[in-house]
Amino acid sequence: MSETRKTNHYWSLQAITLMSNNFATPLTQEQSDTFRQLTSSLNEVQLAWMSGYLAAITAQNGNLIPVPVKNEIIEKQGLSPITILYGSRTGNGEGLAKKAQKLALEFGLTTILKNMDDYKPRDLQSEKNLLVIVSTHGEGEPPFAAKELHEFIYGKRASRLENVNFAVLGLGDSSYFQFCKTGKDFDLQLEKLGAKRLANAGCCDVDFQETADQWLKSTLSAFSGLDGNKVTVTSGENIETSVSQKYSKKNPYQAELLEKINLHGRGSERQTLHIELDADLPFEPGDSAGIMPVNTSELVNEVLSITGLIPEDEVEVKNSKMSLFDALKKEFELSKITIDVVKRYLEYAPNEQLAAILQSPEKLQDYLYGRDIADLFSDYPVLLSAQDLVKILRPLQPRLYSIASSPKANPGELHLAVSVVEYENGGRNRRGACSNYLSDFDGNENKIPVFIEKNPNFRLPKNDETPIIMVGAGTGVAPYRAFVQHRELAEKRGKSWLVFGNRNFESEFLYQTDWQKFLKSGALSKMDVAFSRDTEKRVYVQHKLQENAAEIYQWLEDGAHFYICGDMNKMAADVQNTLVSIVKNQGAMSNDSALDYVNKMQKEKRLQLDVY
Ligand SMILES: Cc1cc2nc3c(=O)[nH]c(=O)nc-3n(C[C@H](O)[C@H](O)[C@H](O)COP(=O)(O)OP(=O)(O)OC[C@H]3O[C@@H](n4cnc5c(N)ncnc54)[C@H](O)[C@@H]3O)c2cc1C
Ligand SMILES: Cc1cc2nc3c(=O)[nH]c(=O)nc-3n(C[C@H](O)[C@H](O)[C@H](O)COP(=O)(O)O)c2cc1C
C-alpha cells in the first residue's frame, strides 16, 4: 500500500476509533450510530471516495477547504479516469475545470486535472476520456497555454485518437468575430483524428456560469454512462479548491476615487487619465482591474429618440422591473454594436442589406467600427417595443485595465492609466462607455465598482535578480509602473529596461517623472523612448529595439524576461517580428532557429504578452 493510501486509511480508521470511544462529535447519537454503522461496513476504497465526496459538499456550501485528493490513481481494472485538460489565460477556464472536477465527484467519476501548459501533446493518444476546456484570445487565437497542443493536433505528428472519448467546452465572447474559435478547433480536430465525441461542444459567452454548469452536468452524465468509468475513488493532481474571491465581477468592490489626473500635457488632442482608487483587493503586478461602467445619458437619450420609445416604459431585466431609461443606462451596451446584436436585430427587422453585411466578415468589421446602437436603429429603422429592444441588446460588460501600481508600494490602492475613447462619426460625438464613465466620474456620486482579473501569464520573474525588458506603447506602459514600483522594494534586484512609445515627447510622455525618479533610484536601469509623431519618419518601439539589437540580445542571453504590452493589432506583431530578427542577426542563426529561440522563451514564460 502506498504512503498516501496508508495515511488516508489511517485517518479514516482513527476517526471511527475516536467516535467509538465516545469522543465529542457534532452528530446526534442517532446520526453517530448510523455513521459508525455505515463507515465500519466500507472498504478502504469506499472510505476514500466518501471522504472526497463529503469534502466536495463542504466546499460547495461555501466553506472552501482543500479537496482531499490523492496524488496517484489507484490502478484498478476497467477504471478509466477523465482527464480534464484546460487552456486558460485569465482564469475563467481554469475555474471551470476545477468546478468540473468537483462536479465529477457527484457523478462518482475519477478525474485528473491538467493544465495544457504542462501537458505533453503526445500523451493525448493514451487518454481514454478527455474533457477539454479552452478559451479563445487575440483575434481567434488559443490562449498561450493551449498554443502548443493546438498546433500539435493540426500537425503531422498528431496520432490517431480512436480510443479517446472527448467533449469540448469553449469559452469566448460573442462580440468577437471568431467566437469560441479555439474550442471549435479542438472539437473538430479531435473528431478528425478519430476521437469519439460524447457531447456537442459547449460555447460559453461572457456570462458563462449558467451555460457552463448545464453543459458540465449533462456531459459528465454522458461520461458516467460509459462502461467501466464509474469508480469509487477520488484521484487527480493535488489541487486546492480556489478560495472564492470575496469580490468578483458579480460582486464588485465599491472603490472610492482618490485621484484623477490627465497624464497628457498641453497640445495633445487626446487624454490618458491616471486614476487612483482606494481598493483593498488582493492582486499582483501584472493583474488587471475590471470596471463596470454606465452609459452616458446623452447616448441613452439618442437611442430613445431614434427608437421613439419612452424613458419611463417599464421593462423586465434579469427578473426585475425597471424603467427603460435605467435599463439603457446601466444594463446594456449602447456605445458599440457587436455581432450577436446584429444577428438578433435581423430576427426582428429582416433587412437584405444588413443580412449581406453580416455574411461578409470584412464588410461587417467595417460597418461595426465606430458605430453605436443609435446608428444601427437609424441605418435600419424598425418599430420595436421597449421589451423587444432590451432583448436585442447585449448586457453591459466590464472593461479591463492593467493595474499601474504595486500593492507593496501602495497598499490598499489600485492605480490605472485609462486612455479616453472619443471620436466623431456622422456629425455626432462618440464616447467610449467605460473610459468616459471614469472621465466624467466626479467622486461625489456612487463609488466605482471594481474587481480583479488575474493574469498569471504576465508576471515578474520569481527571482528579483533576473533582468527584465519591458516594451509598451501608450497605456501599454501601465503594468510596467507596477513592475518597477514592486522591484524598487526588492532587497536585491536585477537590471530593468523600459522601451516606451507614444505620439509626442512634450505632451504624451506617460509617467515621465516616475521614470526619471526610478532611473535615479536605480529601480530602472535603462530607458528608450519612441515618439512617433515628433519626427518626419515615424519611429516606433520596434525601431528602438532594432537600434539596440546587440544589447537586447546580450540581455536575453543573460536570461532576461521580455514583456510586450499594449496594442494587439500592430505593435505586438511588429515587436515579436523584430525580436526574431534581432535573435537571428545577433545570434547568427537561421530564421527557423531564431523562431525556435523565441518560442522557447515563450514556453519558459520568459516572453510574456498582455495585449488588447
Ligand atoms: C487585458 C486588457 C487590459 C487593458 N488595459 C488597458 C489600460 O491599461 N488602459 C486602457 O486605456 N485600456 C485598456 N484596455 C482597453 C479597455 O478595456 C477598453 O477596451 C477601453 O478603455 C475602451 O473602452 P470604452 O468602454 O471606453 O469604449 P467602448 O464603449 O468599448 O467603445 C470602444 C469602441 O469604440 C470604437 N472606437 C474607438 N476608437 C475609435 C476611433 N478613433 N474611431 C472610430 N471608432 C472608434 C471601436 O468600435 C471600439 O470597439 C485593456 C483591455 C484588456 C483586454
Ligand atoms: C484580449 C482578449 C481577446 C479575446 N479574443 C477573443 C476572441 O477572439 N474570440 C472569443 O470568442 N473570445 C475572445 N476573448 C474572450 C475570452 O475568451 C473570454 O473572456 C474567456 O472567458 C476567457 O477565458 P480564460 O480566462 O479561461 O482565458 C478575448 C478576451 C480578451 C481579454
Image (cartoon, helix red, strand yellow):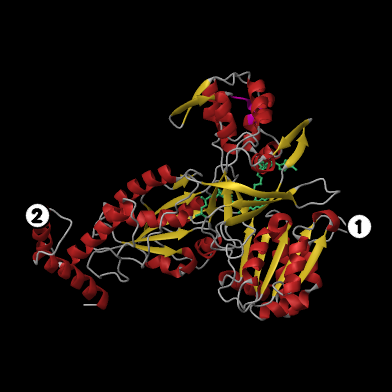
Residue furthest out toward the right = 536
Q: Position of residue 535 (x, y in %)?
A: 90, 59
The residue drawn where x is 72% and y is 69% is 518
Q: Residue tagged by mark 1?
A: 536
- Looking at the figure, which quarter contains the N terminus? bottom left
- Find residue 597 and report its image quarter: bottom right
Q: Main secondary structure of the magenta part?
A: helix
On whether residue 353 falls in the magenta region, the answer is yes
The residue drawn where x is 46% and y is 45% is 208
Q: Magenta stretch: give its range.
A: 350-354
Image marks 1 and 2: residues in contact by CB distance under 8 Å: no
**Image mark for residue 29:** 2
The front one of 341 and 196 is 341
- Find residue 27 and report its image quarter: bottom left
Element marked by disc 2:
helix
Give the amino acid at mark 2: Gln
Answer left or right for 168 relative to 602: left
Q: Position of residue 288 (x, y in %)?
A: 58, 55
Instruction: For label 1, count other residues whose C-alpha is less than 10 Å away and answer few (under 14), some (14-19) or many (20+).
Output: few
The residue drawn where x is 64% and y is 50% is 258
Give the amino acid at mark 1: Glu
Instruction: For label 2, count other residues whose C-alpha is less than 10 Å away and answer few (under 14), some (14-19) or many (20+).
Output: few
Answer left or right for 28 relative to 523: left
In the image, residue 332 above or below residue 386: below
Mark 1 or mark 2: name the one nearer the start of the chain: 2
The front one of 127 and 173 is 173
Residue 505 shows in this picture: yes
